[in-house]
């Protein structure tokens, strides 16, 4: 009898719709504003060219550098292959398939739900209330069998910041019940909102960071998890033996030197300026219905006819991210902040569509 390979797969994988990364969606163009990457690349030299030995699982010197940068003790830091690995590692470590749940707040970064689905872990979705508030009453009702609550702050793709008061309320009602994971992938664009100081007070708080966005190292694949040493200890048991390639450790260590941290903050400043300019320009266009307030390096924009606009930009080689299919985001497009020239070019093209 001929057996189809597909029959060997877990059933939920057959039904699973994979995460559509910006790279998978593709496009042909010269202006890439679809993955929230830093538009300016940096150049590094490898300091070691010999690769016969395995790297350290948790490279001490890199962790000490991140400790110095983040002001968080090294025992509270885990380094991973991008923060996407940490999102998965948390589910692998804390959630039993078909039993435990996670909570997410749509519209948000969809990797939380995608990874949960792969592992057979149910995702209870609780929409954000107006005015960036958490629906605390509703969350309280749904805490049964919940192990992880993922909050993206600032949120991708809307750019909003859930208010700190609600986060503290959430931490209070979840003590001894589950972990609260705050994804701070974009925190350097609004560092005054970072919550790492709460780690001392709440042992069930987990903070995710990455070098992919503000540091401009999306291609490096390096992220950091900040948490109580008990949480870090469990994650260290589960993580693969060699999660980071030696060149990644080398370059990440260089990127966390005083000099490059300074470069990073200068780039953040410039991108935040570009964002203000772009906001001002977009607000004058009649094709724009609404602009979401963003603390991040992207802006979510609601148009009157977003699919048209997406297609026109695409055809002109300006690749942005369509969000029309996401919860509550019909007619919305997410635009990453590019260089001043890229922002300028985008506005020129949008003005021509309107005329
Ligand atoms: C880009 C992004 C990540 C992924 O970060 P990597 O470190 O590149 O894996 C995680 N969370 C959010 C919210 C993001 O937007």
Image: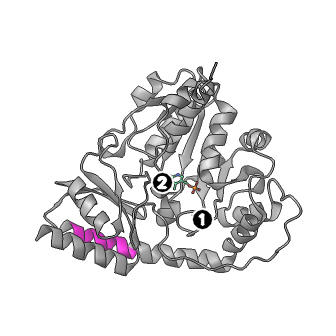
Instruction: Establish whether ligand 1 lies closer than 8 Å to the Cβ of label 2.
Output: no
In front here: 280 or 252?
252
Residue 48 occupies quadrant: bottom right
Q: Magenta span covers which residues?
A: 273-282
Label 2 CA crowd tier, 10 Å (few <14, some 14–19, many 20+): few
**Considering the image in quadrants, where does the C terminus appear?**
bottom left
Residue 17, percent from left and from top = 46, 37
Q: Is residue 203 visible?
A: no
Give me the residue at 40% from left, 61% from top. 295
Give me the residue at 60% from left, 56% from top. 209
Give me the residue at 24% from left, 53% from top. 307
Q: In the rendered image, which residue does mark 1 sit on?
A: 219
Q: Is residue 28 visible?
A: yes
Residue 294, percent from left and from top = 36, 59
Label 1 CA crowd tier, 10 Å (few <14, some 14–19, many 20+): few
The secondary structure type at the circle numbered 1 is loop
Q: Is residue 254 left or right of residue 263?
A: right
Give me the residue at 64% from left, 18% from top. 1
What's the magenta bit mostly, secondary-structure-wise? Answer: helix
Q: In the rendered image, which residue does mark 2 sit on?
A: 24
Instruction: From this view, report whether residue 343 is shown above or below residue 230.
Output: below
Instruction: From this view, report whether residue 17 is shown above or below residue 271.
Output: above
């Amino acid at each position: 009898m001929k057996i189809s390979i597909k029959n060997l797969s877990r059933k939920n994988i057959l039904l699973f719709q994979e995460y559509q990364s910006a790279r998978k969606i593709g496009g042909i163009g010269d202006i890439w504003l679809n993955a929230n990457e830093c538009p300016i690349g940096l150049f590094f030299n490898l300091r070691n060219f010999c690769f016969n030995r395995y790297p350290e699982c948790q490279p001490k010197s890199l962790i000490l550098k991140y400790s110095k940068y983040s002001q968080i003790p090294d025992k509270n830091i885990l380094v991973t292959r991008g923060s996407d690995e940490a999102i998965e590692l948390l589910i692998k470590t804390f959630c039993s398939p078909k039993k435990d749940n996670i909570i997410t707040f749509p519209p948000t970064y969809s990797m939380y739900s995608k990874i949960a689905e792969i592992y057979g872990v149910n995702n209870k979705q609780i929409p954000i209330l107006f005015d960036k508030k958490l629906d605390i009453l509703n969350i309280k009702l749904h805490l049964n069998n919940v192990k992880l609550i993922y909050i993206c702050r600032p949120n991708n793709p809307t750019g909003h910041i859930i208010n700190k008061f609600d986060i503290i309320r959430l931490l209070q009602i979840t003590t001894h019940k589950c972990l609260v994971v705050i994804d701070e992938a974009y925190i350097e664009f609004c560092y005054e909102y970072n919550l790492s100081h709460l780690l001392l007070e709440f042992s069930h708080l987990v903070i995710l960071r990455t070098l992919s966005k503000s540091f401009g190292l999306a291609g490096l694949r390096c992220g950091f998890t900040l948490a109580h040493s008990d949480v870090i200890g469990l994650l260290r048991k589960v993580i693969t033996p060699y999660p980071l390639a030696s060149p990644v450790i080398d370059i990440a260590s260089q990127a966390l030197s005083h000099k490059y941290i300074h470069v990073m903050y200068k780039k953040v400043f410039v991108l935040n300026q570009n964002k203000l300019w772009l906001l001002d320009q977009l607000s004058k266009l009649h094709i724009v219905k609404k602009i979401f307030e963003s603390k991040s390096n992207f802006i979510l924009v609601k148009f009157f006819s977003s699919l048209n606009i997406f297609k026109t930009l695409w055809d002109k080689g300006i690749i942005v991210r369509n969000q029309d299919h996401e919860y509550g985001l019909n007619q919305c497009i997410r635009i990453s902040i590019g260089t001043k020239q890229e922002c300028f070019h985008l506005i020129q093209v949008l003005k021509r569509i309107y005329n």
